[in-house]
């Protein structure tokens, strides 16, 4: 379906089949619902997706709708949606719902395979660094578990370091890890400090806010597992702002890959760490591009065109995220308006006359 969520979803559906589940559900910032809806359609499950109000990229929403998921647009943010669907799955047996969020351990088992793919791509020589965007922190947790197991089995001689990158507008892990200094400590991590951070956010009425909708999350459900992964892989955490994310998204595009905004946080974060001297110039770095470029075409078009040519204001006003301002990017590649005239067209093409 165009995101890494498929790596986990296929494993979780296998388990859902094993326990004879018939209905599956998830809360989603987009890609989980797209992946869930696709696998449900393929495997013949009834499918419910809970999405936050107005906080989903159209590429992802269109997939959920097209694959036939019953889509509930709940008036609340992602954290509210997740609380609802968890409650229904755990406390309302008559709903008969099998929960497919990344609290489902089989999804994380499937996502371990991403680390095997990186090894495959590098001739089974582990890189020095794995850099990944952090939202609900399932992916980085899975990466940590993958390396714990591969090291234990003697499949790898070296364990890469892990860098988890938050968006500046959703930097709970960054705060907890770098400001509160919370560490795994063999599972006895300081829960009070994490709670305190959540309380502070609630008191301040602070809500996650970033163009990278896939990581726009206040309370990452896999935070404990992520602390464990950071501990095992001698990890670091950083955050990058929306401008930096979009500039690096454009850079990834220019390389012929392309990705959605959240994915570019990894490349942006790697740059920050390189500048800080944490990542050394000679080191091998694998940045995980988590989602496809077509997932969020609005963000891309807004970046490249900025204000529309009639000066009627920002094109964002018509997109799904009018609340997020996108300045014209430094790699902006505007379409060139030209008359239907051969000479004008050749001039616009840069062909000398
Ligand atoms: C889900 C998602 C993330 C965040 O992954 P977590 O496992 O929740 O940390 C990042 N990028 C994309 C494109 C995603 O879909």
Image: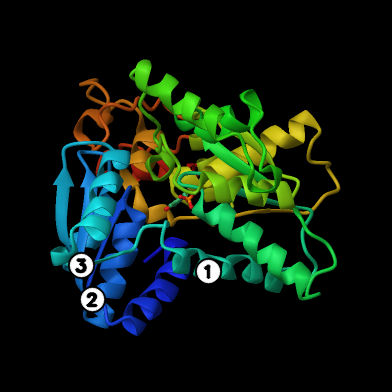
Q: Give coordinates of residue 119: x percent, y percent.
A: 71, 69
Q: Distance between the residues labelled 1 and 2?
A: 22 Å
Label 2 Cα neighbours within 10 Å, binned few <14 / some 14-19 / many ≥20: some
Would you identify the image quadrant in which residue 277 lies? Answer: top right
What residue is at 35 percent from the left and 24 percent from the top?
325
What residue is at 36 percent from the left and 39 percent from the top?
299
Q: Which of 345 and 234 is in front in this view?
A: 234
- Vertical placement of residue 168 versus 83, above or below: above
- Vertical placement of residue 237 versus 59, above or below: above
Q: Which of marks 1 and 2 is nearer the N terminus?
A: 2
Label 2 vs label 3, nearer the camera = 3
Quarter holding the N terminus is: bottom left
Q: The residue tagged with tag 2: helix, strand or loop? A: helix
Which residue is the site of mark 1? 109
Q: Nearer the viewer, residue 48 or 167?
A: 48
Relative placement, left or right, of 265 versus 325 is: right
Mark drawn on residue 41: 2
Q: Which of 271 and 190 is in front in this view?
A: 190
Q: The residue tagged with tag 3: helix, strand or loop? A: strand
Say whether residue 247 is visible. Answer: no
Q: Are marks 2 and 3 in contact (CB under 8 Å)?
A: yes
Q: Give coordinates of residue 80: x percent, y percent.
A: 27, 39
Label 1 Cα neighbours within 10 Å, binned few <14 / some 14-19 / many ≥20: many
Mark drawn on residue 47: 3
Count of marks, rendered view: 3
Q: The residue tagged with tag 1: helix, strand or loop? A: helix
- Vertical placement of residue 313 versus 283, above or below: above
Q: Nearer the viewer, residue 318 or 10?
A: 10
Q: Earlier in the sequence, mark 3 or mark 1?
A: 3
Q: Are marks 3 and 1 in contact (CB under 8 Å)?
A: no
Label 1 vs label 2, nearer the camera = 1
Q: Give coordinates of residue 114: x percent, y percent.
A: 58, 66
């Amino acid at each position: 379906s165009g995101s890494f969520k498929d790596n986990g979803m296929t494993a979780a559906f296998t388990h859902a089949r094993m326990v004879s589940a018939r209905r599956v559900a998830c809360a989603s910032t987009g890609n989980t619902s797209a992946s869930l809806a696709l696998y449900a359609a393929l495997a013949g499950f009834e499918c419910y997706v809970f999405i936050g109000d107005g906080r989903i990229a159209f590429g992802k929403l269109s997939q959920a709708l097209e694959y036939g998921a019953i889509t509930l647009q709940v008036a609340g943010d992602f954290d509210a949606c997740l609380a609802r669907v968890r409650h229904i799955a755990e406390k309302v047996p008559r709903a008969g719902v099998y929960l497919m969020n990344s609290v489902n351990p089989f999804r994380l088992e499937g996502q371990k395979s991403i680390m095997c793919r990186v090894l495959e791509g590098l001739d089974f020589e582990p890189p020095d660094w794995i850099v990944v965007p952090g939202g609900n922190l399932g992916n980085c947790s899975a990466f940590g578990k993958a390396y714990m197991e591969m090291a234990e089995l003697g499949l790898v001689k070296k364990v890469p370091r892990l860098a988890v990158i938050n968006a500046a507008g959703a930097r709970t892990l960054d705060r907890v890890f770098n400001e509160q200094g919370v560490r795994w400590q063999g599972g006895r991590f300081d829960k009070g400090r994490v709670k305190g951070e959540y309380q502070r956010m609630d008191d301040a009425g602070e809500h996650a806010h970033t163009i990278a909708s896939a990581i726009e999350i206040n309370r990452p459900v896999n935070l404990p597992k992520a602390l464990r992964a950071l501990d095992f892989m001698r990890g670091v955490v950083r955050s990058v702002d929306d401008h930096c994310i979009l500039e690096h998204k454009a850079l990834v595009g220019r390389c012929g890959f392309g990705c959605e905004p959240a994915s570019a946080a990894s490349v942006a974060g790697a740059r920050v760490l390189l500048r800080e001297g944490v990542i050394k110039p000679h080191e091998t770095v694998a940045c995980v591009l988590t989602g496809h470029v077509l997932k969020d075409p609005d963000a891309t078009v807004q970046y490249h065109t900025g204000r529309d040519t009639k000066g009627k204001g920002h094109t964002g006003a018509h997109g799904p995220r009018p609340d997020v301002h996108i300045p014209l990017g430094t790699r902006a590649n505007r379409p060139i308006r030209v008359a239907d005239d051969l000479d004008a067209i050749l001039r616009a093409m840069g062909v000398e006359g």
